[in-house]
Amino acid sequence: MKQILPFLLLLAACSPKVQTPDPESLKPAWLKNEPFQDGYYTGVGHSIKDGTNNYIQEAKKSALDDLVSEIKVNVSSTSVLSTMEFDKQLQEQYEQVIKTTAADDIQEFELVDAWEDNQNYWVYYRLSIGRYKQIKEEQKRDAVTLATDYFKKGRVSEGTKDYLQSLGFYFQAFRSIEKYLAEPIKATIDEQEILLVNETFAAIQRTLNNITVRVDPSQIMVNRRVNQNDLNVIAKTTYKDGRNAVGMPLKAIFVKGDGDIHPQYKANEKGLAKILINQIGSKEVEQTISIRVDVDALAGGTGTSKVYSIITSTFKLPEAFLMLKVKRPMVYLTSDEKSLGSSKANLQLTNKLKNMLASNGFEFTTNKNQADLWFDVKSDSEKGSVSGSIYITYLTSVIKVTAMKEGKEIYTTTLDRIKGYGLDYDKSSVDAYNKALETLEKERVKEIIATVLE
């Protein structure tokens, strides 16, 4: 036995050492080199397995995005994107949107392989180029059939000068083929071959050119505290032959300044719509509102796509402008600030409130009769307990706002029992006031301003 043991030790020493495989060598070939298969679009996706995500779905989405990036969008020289002289940036936006949305449309892609380690997951998908083109041609054929039908109806309505209905049909035609704007799609209408997308675009603009939008008055003086009873702004839509554009959808938006305005309207039987301004949010003295034909409503009102939004932004829409001369609200400010029952020389809360109102476009007056708003500040601190060498006080402050014209209180807020600490009661009262200033600035000012401007 003693002779065998040295022999076994010698044999173990001479045995080859077992090495751990290199993790990179275990990876499949499609991870080491970008995969290519003739006749296929391919995509590889990756996700990290962090225990909180659906890493398989994330990798799949990543792979499909990679696959879609191989699909090229070629803009034909006779397509609407070229012949209508759209700028290069618009074409790039269109191409990007088409690629982005293509991932939602592709069908019949297949999983080739998947591989994972402890922290990562990879997946490999492919899509037959031939089958993809076949599916897209079938989808395009259906879209062209639908768009052609809408276009024919639009042309009939335009011929009878029912421009509202014709725009509805033309926009439906446009939406049916919006994914094919880069292609020269041909259709036969009244025994004449046309480029369908181009003719639809031209028909929409031609019909829009028959509409006129006016606003009366075109300029108004308005207080930032908007009172609907003081406003009487009317938009009127007509056709160029003098008829009222009954039922025409309109959209109102701020193009300079900012505020809350009722966005959508429909012209009544006289072609009229009253514009409603709910709030003016900007401090600018001069602001502008645009009232224009609402092309989203003409196209169905809901679910307009990114492609649709890009292209319709190039139309020259019937539009009118309302100029606002904005008057700043006049504030009368009173206060009674106390510390431990005695009047304070330094009106901290009042001065802070005044500064914040001024920075938000309010002006001040010492004449109460000239004011739009009366702000009244009352505050006092009271002694609390003593804990060792620390004195505690409690501050309560009430801010009330009255609308002078209406003669009624429109807002009240209370900073209730804000606790201050100090080495004596005076110092703890100062600390409570400082905390109240912070609360006023961070939590209450936006609420106060939003409320008083309603």
Image: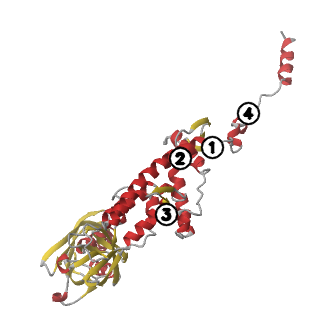
Amino acid type for the residue under numbered disc 3: Asn
Residue drawn at x 37%, y 69% is: 207
Any part of residue 282 in sight: no
Residue at numbered disc 2? 137
Q: In front of the other: label 2 or label 4?
A: 2
Task: Using the numbered discs, state the Cα–Cα distance from disc 2 to disc 1 in whole angstroms.
Answer: 21 Å
Density class for disc 4 (Cα within 10 Å; few <14, some 14-19, many ≥20) is: few
The tag on residue 21 is: 4
Of pointers 2 and 3, the one earlier in the residue sequence: 2
Task: Using the numbered discs, state the Cα–Cα distance from disc 2 to disc 4 in whole angstroms.
Answer: 49 Å
The tag on residue 65 is: none
- Disc 2 to disc 4: CB gap under 8 Å: no
Amino acid type for the residue under numbered disc 2: Glu
- Disc 2 to disc 3: CB gap under 8 Å: no
Amino acid type for the residue under numbered disc 4: Pro
Residue at numbered disc 3? 198
Task: Using the numbered discs, state the Cα–Cα distance from disc 4 to disc 1 in whole angstroms.
Answer: 29 Å
Residue at numbered disc 1? 42
